[in-house]
Amino acid sequence: MPKLLAALLLTLLSAVSTPSATAADMQLRVGTLASKNSLYHRQLLEVGEAWRAAQGGTSKYVVYPDGSQGGEAEMARRMRIGQLQGALLSVVGLREIEPSITALQNLPLLFRSWEELDYVREKMRPAMEKKFQDKGFVVLAWGDAGWVRFFSKEAAVRPDDYKRMKFFAWGSEPEQQSIMKSLGYTPVPLETADILPSIQTGMINVVPSTPYFALASQVYNTAPHMLEINWAPIVGAMVVTSKAWEAMAPEAQKALRAAGEKAGAQMRAQARQEVTEAVEAMKKRGLIVHKPNPAEMQEWNALAEALYPRIRGTMVPAETFDEVFKQVKAYRALAAK
């Protein structure tokens, strides 16, 4: 009996110690569309250094930039099957995990300022993060990448001007394509890597893009006309799978969360500054900026108002749609005081 008890105790001790050894040797593979050495790539590397130092052992942290792991929908799939443990994604990829996130990006001309977006995001953040957790993911950082502007081969200012053109559209957003078609626009579903060759060959004529991406990808060389309109913010987040999170040492979880919060704040601050800097850099190299006059802006606002009923319940879950409008209204009431 004493020998049997000793054997059982040894087995239990082995079982307890095994996860720690595995955790010390774990790998955290993170994918992103962000280009190598970009602001976002550098922030991901800093997050990794903090995690690796706290995790200890022979743990490894690898970032795959430039969309080398596929588009954002593909990266979400890779996380589910364990090929990736994390990713920095925009709403395009995050919606594959939790559809309610679309409320922060897919409502054109709703947000009038970064302060308005920040207020709404913080109000909705706890519920959003809980929804991601229920789907098996932990949100570590919230970021954004600037306002979407329209870059086109030909000059265009009014909504109807774009009806004769072909738009880049995310291949993973069939609802958006359907709405665009119903309003007389021509979407061409593609992945990010296809944008530059497609606009160079004429497959598309318009790229809805942030100025930073247009500059980094050189899209503006082929599409030198930019409409200065804050159509929608590009919102993103860094997530890791709950499986990877739970395998980490407690110290590593704490370090990763702190590093993620810091990276998110830096990404937001620097990305917003780079909107203006990118536009100025492109203007020096031939970019032509078109700013709608009040009458033309009224047409754009009318288009957005016509889009909202189509978006509610399709591109954005109805409940979340209503919550965003409620929070926007609350912010504007506070700002008016």
Image: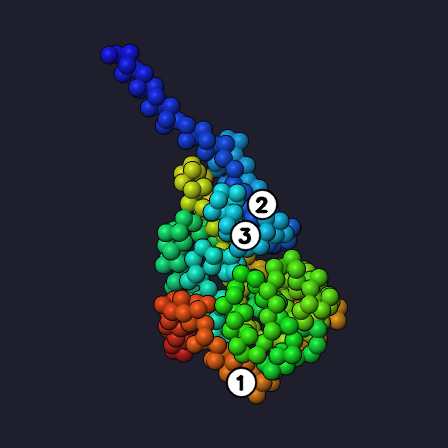
Residue positioned 42% across, 30% down in the render: 20
Local crowd at mark 1 within 10 Å, few (<14), some, or many (≥20)?
Answer: few
Three-letter code, disc 3: Glu
Residue positioned 43% across, 57% down in the render: 98
> Closer to the observer: label 3 or label 2?
3
Q: CA distance from mark 2 to mark 1?
A: 44 Å
Three-letter code, disc 1: Gln
Q: Circle 3 — which element?
A: helix
Q: Is residue 4 above or below residue 258?
A: above
Residue positioned 58% across, 69% down in the render: 148
Residue 81: x, y in percent? 48, 44
The image quadrant where one finds the N terminus is: top left
Residue 117: x, y in percent? 46, 67
Residue identifier under label 3:
74
Residue identifier under label 1:
298
Q: CA distance from mark 3 to mark 1?
A: 38 Å
Q: Earlier in the sequence, mark 3 or mark 2?
A: 2
Q: Is residue 81 above or below residue 286?
A: above
Q: Which mark is residue 100?
A: none
Q: CA distance from mark 3 to mark 2?
A: 16 Å
Residue 113: x, y in percent? 50, 71
Q: Nearer the viewer, residue 184 or 94?
A: 184
> Closer to the observer: label 3 or label 1?
3
Q: Circle 2 — which element?
A: strand
